[in-house]
Amino acid sequence: MAITKDVLIVGAGLSGLYAARLLKQAGLSVGVLEARNRIGGRALSEQLSNGETVDLGAQWISPLQKRIWALTEEFGLDRLETNTQGKAIVQVGGQLRRVSGRTPPLSWFGLFDVWQLSWQMERLVRQIDIDMPWQHPQASKLDHISFTDWLKQQTITSEGYDYWHHIVTSGMCADPSSFSPLEVLHQIASIGGLNALEQADTHILEQGTQTISRRLAEELGDCISLSSGVRSLQQTERAVKATTDAGDFYGKRIILALPPQLISKISFDQTLTKFPKQENRNWVLGKVIKHVVVYETAWWRSSGLSGIADTPSEPIDFLADSSIEGKRTGILVAFSSGPNAIKMNEMDSETREAVVLAHIQKVLGKSPTEHIYFQSKNWTAETHSRGGFASRRPIGGWTKHRSLLTDFSSPIHVAGTETATEWRSYMEGALQSAERASAEVIAALI
């Protein structure tokens, strides 16, 4: 038999690499198996010809996120505040408006509607048991209705409905008719409430977020096997055998640091899992395409604009300034989320680029110079991601399946931001889930 590691970790994203670090620090032998030919998972940074870095995947962090904040401190990475100086563009009723601050430009009645639902949601969020949301007194009711239908019941104006529908669609990267209010409430509860949500995207990293994964990988050395996608897991007499594209590996314990849609692709020995394979296929895939456009300067700032644009009726539902302070170039990041991502996915690359550039001109004005870089990253089309920012439980998923992702027999543990109880769907959630999974393994083996 080949050498048996104490732990095999499937997935070299942030969660898998952080779990490997914690386990090695505890004195356990570790092997990390990654299907891609790179590390980082849904964090992907690309260096421009001028030496600057852009993030094509996960990007924003916050000082409220203690683990990732500590890692950036440890690795000496430069945290830069997201630019919010200037007026933002907000689309209301099809009209583009310039606004200052975070208050949406709605009627007083519309603002009241937005506020009253905020109050309702915050009240429900405080009642959620983050580890067992299905125990909420209204769990069945909140989990067996779509968020869209629930929103219609809870709002009293079209303005209030449109506001929350856009916020949830862009934040969850999926049509709100496909998941329940309980799913949304658990997401918000994991962050710490709506106030914390407003502070979730305060900083970017000059070196790019994938740098964190690269630094973790440097520590781990040669225990990472790339291009080693796991096809099956089988319990043998002494260990679990992982059959991969690059051969067989053995581990006493397995951590699956993968989103549920990729876990469902693995063939399990029937002794290793307690649920049918199709249950993990039922998750709602987050659909998002991230577009990055670089100009010679941040030209929109001279017009008094922040570069932020919320436009629910456009193919680009959110736009933000991602320029590096002290650098000359101007960087805009644009997102097509949920239904918009589906529409943009049908376009060829040239058409998609033209649509993005036309949108920027429509909301910010005409650039005085041509852009010098464009990249569109379709995370839904990524074979080894199949979605972003994260996957969502379907309607009824919390009350029917409960702890589905961890419903394995003892040798198997699950990490990944979808399993987090703090900052779920964020990089911080990936780290928190790694802490939990590695603690389970350490308790079992040491």
Image (spheres, rainbow, N blue to C red):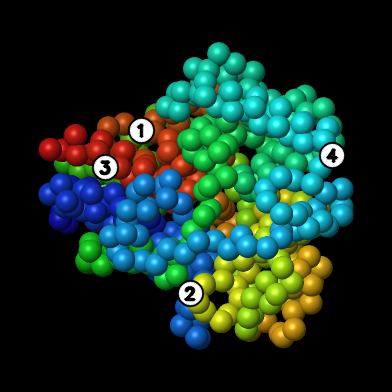
> Secondary structure under badge 3?
helix
Q: Do the CB atoms of the residues marked 3 and 4 lie less than 8 Å apart?
A: no
Q: Amino acid at mark 4?
A: Ser
Look at the image and tell me in which quarter the C terminus lies.
top left
Q: Out of 356 and 198, give the one closest to the viewer.
A: 198
Q: Residue at x 62, y 83 (%)?
A: 296
Q: Do the CB atoms of the residues marked 2 and 4 lie less than 8 Å apart?
A: no
Viewer-nearest of discs 2 and 3: 2
**Which mark sits nearer the N-terminus, 2 or 4?**
2
Q: Residue at x 79, y 47 (%)?
A: 105
Question: According to the image, label 2 marks what residue?
Answer: 53
Question: According to the image, label 3 marks what residue?
Answer: 438
> Secondary structure under badge 2?
strand
Q: Residue at x 63, y 22 (%)?
A: 142
Using the numbered discs, state the Cα–Cα distance from disc 3 to disc 4 in whole angstroms.
50 Å
- Other residues around mark 1 within 10 Å, as few (<14) / some (14–19) / many (≥20): some
Label of residue 408 in the image: 1
Q: Residue furthest top?
A: 137
**Which mark sits nearer the N-terminus, 3 or 1?**
1
